[in-house]
Amino acid sequence: MRVLAIDQGTSATKAVVFDDDGEILTSVEAAVTPRAVSGGGVEQDPEQLWESVLLAGQDAIARSGGGVAAVGFANQGETVLAWDRGTGRPLSTAISWQDRRAASICAEMAPDAAALTRTTGLPLDPYFAAPKMAWLRRHATNKGVVTTSDSWLLHRLTGLYATDATTASRTLLLDLESRTWSEEACAAFGLEGMDLPTVVGSAQEIGSTDAFGPSLPLSGLSVDQQAALVGEHCLEVGESKCTYGTGAFLLANAGARPFASSAGLAVSVAWQLGEDASYCIDGQVYAAGAALAWLQRWGFLGRAQDLDEVAASVRDSGGVSVVPSLSGLGAPWWRPDALASIDGIGPGTEPAHVVRATVDGLAAQVTLLARAAAEDLGHPLAVLRVDGGLTRSRMLMQTQADLLQIPVEVASSQHATAAGVAALARLGAGAARTLDEAVHRADSHVHYEPAISAVEAADRLAGFERAVARLTGTANTTIP
């Protein structure tokens, strides 16, 4: 069964057509341009998001020669906008998941934080959708509905008003156990009585669309990172993946029952099939590819593809530490106010030392997330499956294996999110009986083993944690 998978991301929309065997027939990418605004804001033009979905999807189908039988759609997750249900017209810009302007709302709501986490599985942080929804209501418009971007795009594609359970679980408004909107959570954010979209499953025919040419059923829905969890075939409890894109996102399969993380991570719906759901724990590095873009903008790095050459031109970071928290620190710190830092600069510091330290900082943050996940799971991760554009960097991937002290398996395709939502669409359209059958997992094409001792890894990780402690003014945050 041929499937069109749409992956609407932060910096681009990707459209991939998969054949019956899960092989890629064609892949098209349409760029989108987030815009930084004062006060920690990051916005996107909703119409540009829509045009990118149309252009990429139509082009992918045309290049594939037709024969597509279903569509899967993955989305950014925590990006929100206000819009008119009658006309489909946006009433605000799209407030990106990277936007931190709702930090003041979260600070006001601090007394509600513990109760919200117990209900929704999420820490109270402006990264998630509800604080941004409340911010929009206060500062932009009281008109229309305010939803995550997927609901608006799905409305334009199908005419329906819906979101899937994985995306709903990223809002801070969903009761994680019942997978229904929580009246208490809505009231806490001042969103009581708001018209929220219908929550649907991850693999079911919710409607049809003719936006890409022929009328096609839309039968797979997911937030992007959960789709990548499926695409990396992390279907058993404890299996984990990390996607390295604009940010880096580590998710681990946590099984069929929701729980509250004891290690500062978020707990969300991994997928919902019929009335049954699986859950995942996750942590976020908000600036991964975004950190490299910053290095390029300020002349530390010429081109992204030069990362390995520049980083390898020095033996180590030369005592420089970089905490690349350009959009605040996520799990396990949850410090939206934290700014990026570069310290340890001396007379002999070269630009390459800063580049090398950035690689180390990215890998260290992911390692701390993996340790937190291990605490929640009750056992260490055995292997980390990885995907995304930054996995092309051998330096970053080797550093990641070194600090983790476990193997790192790089996916053979950079389209794990698309592959995951394609599998859900295949299952939802009845072309597979189980999720395992629907996923076509290719062997990893690069395998990295730790090349340093556990003692050296612990020492390097402790150095990064000291840098975080200096930045945040907190005690050492090592997770045992």
Image: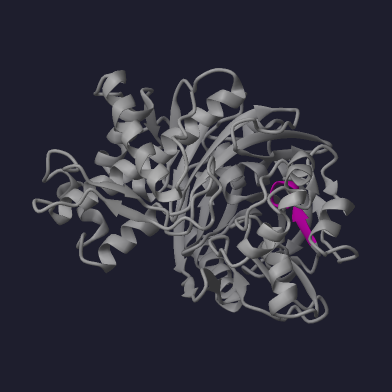
Q: Nearer the viewer, residue 180 or 9?
A: 180
Is 26 located above or below residue 296 in the figure? above
- Image coordinates for residue 159, horizontal then vertical, percent: 79, 69
User: Relative to 166, is 385 above or below?
Assistant: above
Residue 108 appears in the picture as rendered:
yes
- Residue 102 higher or lower than 72, as above or below: below
Judge by depth and name the residue closer to the eye, 95 or 48: 95
Residue lying at 49% horizontally and 50% vertically, measured from the top left: 329
| Image quarter of the N terminus | top right
**What residue span does the magenta drawing correspond to?**
162-168
- Image coordinates of residue 279 in percent, x first then y, are 69, 34
Whether residue 323 sits left or right of residue 126 in the image: it is left
Foreground pick, 246 / 217: 246
Question: Can residue 447 be seen at all in this image of the molecule?
Answer: no
Q: Where is residue 328 in the image (x, y as percent from the top left)?
A: 49, 55
- Horizontal arrangement in the rendering, residue 253 relative to residue 360 (left or right): right
